[in-house]
Amino acid sequence: MTDTSKSNLSKKATKKAAKHEETWGEFFKTVFFAFLIAISFRTLVLQPFSIPSESMLKNLMVGDFLLVSKFSYGFTKHSLPFSLPLISGRIFASDIERGDVVVFRLPRDPDTYYIKRIIGRPGDKIQTMNGELYLNDVKVPRKRLDDYVRLDGYGYEERFQRYQETLPNGKSYVTLDKGVFQNRADNSDVFIVPQGHYFAMGDNRDNSMDSRWPKNIGVGYVPDINIIGKAKWITASFDNNSALWQFWKWFPAERRERFFSSIN
């Protein structure tokens, strides 16, 4: 082989290697920007969540998949991945209203997310007596609805009293209750919500460790900066009792209507 042929082969190999490196470079650049866009969207716009407990039953059920609006209330450091301390307080803030269903980082463990309904704002006086809610010394009106009845995990009938509560701002929602004295929080202390904090409760009143319980075992008062978004939509809902291969149980009748529904 002549020196000229060797030179041409070397040039071709060099060009091939350069093209190969360029292709991988474009690939990693595309992946990086896709990741950046996904993180930005999740941080600033919408974040997906799933419901792990029955504390918000029946408005939210285990197996519900949600989208939470991150821009509804503005942003705090807890809106960012790993709670990066890049934001002081809350920026682009909007009011967090009584009756809103919010996702927040648990005060005693910021790596854990909770979802509850805001009942009290800063300065509000909250108390439950005989299972009924009092806000600023006024009993919150509630209307008795038909009972919610289901079968428990052992096949026995489980019955809940259903009530429609209406807050002073007109927001209305349904709560479940198993009856007075089913939970020691049915008769609570008097709570005065501190400035910069909120009082949150689960709609399933006898199965929710919420602001009625001290933060070392429950939620306690929720700091404003811990609230990261407003729960807006249920995108999908699956029967949590079905195995992966039991596809015919994925969509029980009561779950189909939950797809793409808004959260009250």
Image (cartoon, rainbow, N blue to C red):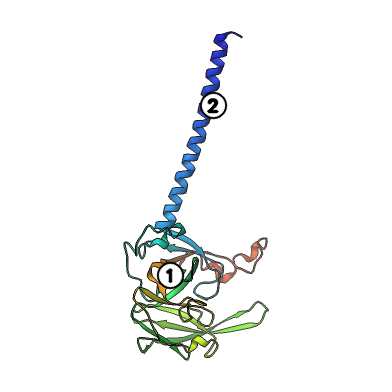
- Viewer-nearest of labels 1 and 2? 2
Counting from the top left corner in percent of width and height, residue 9 is at 56, 16
- Are the residues tagged 1 and 2 within 8 Å (C-beta)? no
Front one among 189 and 147:
189
Q: Residue furthest top?
A: 2
Task: Establish if 182 lies above or below 1.
Answer: below
Residue that numbered label 2 is attached to? 17
Q: Is residue 199 left or right of residue 28?
A: left
Residue that numbered label 1 is attached to? 102
Q: Quadrant of residue 62?
A: bottom right
Task: For label 2, count other residues whose C-alpha is less than 10 Å away and answer few (under 14), some (14-19) or many (20+).
Answer: few
Front one among 213 and 208:
213
Task: For label 1, count other residues whose C-alpha is less than 10 Å away and answer few (under 14), some (14-19) or many (20+).
Answer: many
Residue drawn at x 45%, y 60% as measured from the top left = 47
Counting from the top left corner in percent of width and height, residue 90 is at 34, 64
**Sooner in the amino-acid sequence: mark 1 or mark 2:** 2
Task: Establish if 46 lies above or below 23.
Answer: below
Front one among 33 and 1:
1
Counting from the top left corner in percent of width and height, residue 2 is at 58, 8
Give the quadrant of the N terminus: top right
Residue drawn at x 38%, y 74% as measured from the top left = 197
Counting from the top left corner in percent of width and height, residue 191 is at 40, 84
> Label 1 to label 2, Cα distance in Å?
53 Å
Element under disc 2: helix
Disc 1 residue type?
Val
Give the quadrant of the C terminus: bottom left
Disc 2 residue type?
Ala
Q: Is residue 4 left or right of residue 71?
A: right
Element under disc 1: strand
